[in-house]
Amino acid sequence: MPERRFLVVRLGSLGDIVHTFPAVGALRESFPAAEIVWLTHPRWKLLVSSSGLASKTWTTETRSLASWKKTIREIRDAKFDMAVDYQGLWKSAAPAFFAGVPERIGFAPASVREFGVPILYTEHVQATSSHVADQNGELTLRAGALAPVAEVQLHPPPVDDEAFLKYSSARGVDRYVVLSPGGGWRSKCWPPERFGTLCRMIADSLSLRCVVNYGPGEDDLAAKVRDSSSDTDPLLFNGELGPLMSLLRHAECVVGGDTGPLHLAVALGTPVVALFGPTNPARNGPYRGAKGAVTTPRAAATINNEDIVLRAPNVITTHTRGDQPHPSMLEIQVDAVFDAVRRIIKGRA
């Protein structure tokens, strides 16, 4: 019997793709000789390819009609047995549908964000797990895998790793902590001034340099962190995906909110201090496939393997986007974050 041919669809974004890796990893372990083609956005081709899970990585630009038609034609010509849509949007479900893939697995209506999308699937999965990575794993099980998730660890591209190590060495950055003050929504972000104070405490008490990672449109956050860090001179870093992977991989620890770089750091094997407020870490928190996290008596910190999650008690989860830090983010004090960083650094000594 010929090996099955799977089309995996997860177009974006950074953190969401990282949380899809364990599910696709289980698909790969269950069908080691199968062809698995991953369809994603061009921006994330390097990320998907670095996982080593897909036989091929295809890209499509959903805002381009020409790219859309080309993708559907390629899917039709490839004659896939099954498509698994881990995203649950019209733009992720449509290509396999219009290309006529016979089996199309996706989430049931209660588990998707856009109304009506499941009509494009032949099989619907009602997710029952808390964490989104485990929910993805439920799709993998429906696809016939032996397990829902598998351990996956990323590695930076060697050329980027070598270039980054030269870059950091030239700037006197050896052992360092990465601070990631940005995020897709400013309401998920911890105030940059507090990151600056944290930077000063890390330098004074732990003798470690801080590197401030920031993305497009976050220059103001990086500048505020630097200006609030006294004379500790943090290195400001705004690099492409490959160098970013190297930065995160070689860090002693990464501190940030519910953002792509934080989840990428986890996938690279680096411990994190995750600062959560409006979004729920039970669904979107650091994920290493471990069960049974330990919670402190005050429910302020959750320890999951090497990672520490800080969230104020009794926060009501919301995905409403705002341009100012959510009040729950303001409840996370600098001393608590520094203590979490200190514990991780001490544990790695």
Image: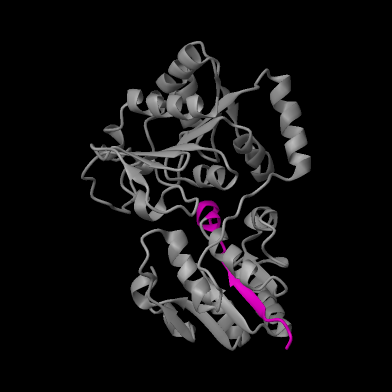
**Residue at the (39%, 77%) spot, across then down:** 108
Pick the front one: 61 or 274:
274
- Residue 15 visible, this orientation: yes
Quarter of the image for residue 79 reads: bottom right
Q: State the image coordinates of residue 236 (x, y, percent, origin top left).
A: 58, 26
> Residue 7 lies in magenta, yes or no?
yes
Quarter of the image for residue 233 reads: top right
Tell me which colouring the rendered structure shows: one colour
Q: Say above or below: 195 vs 297.
A: above
Pick the front one: 347 or 217:
347
Q: Say above or below: 195 vs 274.
A: above
Q: Say above or below: 335 vs 25.
A: above
Q: Is residue 72 left or right of residue 228?
A: right
Q: Furthest-left residue in view?
A: 314
Q: Residues in magenta?
A: 1-18
- Residue 229 visible, this orientation: no
**Residue at the (77%, 42%) spot, across then down:** 158
**Residue at the (60%, 44%) spot, across then down:** 268
How many numbered marks have been drawn onto this rendered protein structure?
0
Q: State the image coordinates of residue 184 (x, y, percent, origin top left).
A: 45, 47
Q: State the image coordinates of residue 259 (x, y, percent, origin top left).
A: 47, 45
Pick the front one: 314 or 343:
343
In the picture, the quarter occupied by the N terminus is: bottom right
Quarter of the image for residue 23 reads: bottom right
**Residue at the (55%, 24%) spot, across then down:** 349
Q: State the image coordinates of residue 291 (x, y, percent, origin top left).
A: 41, 54
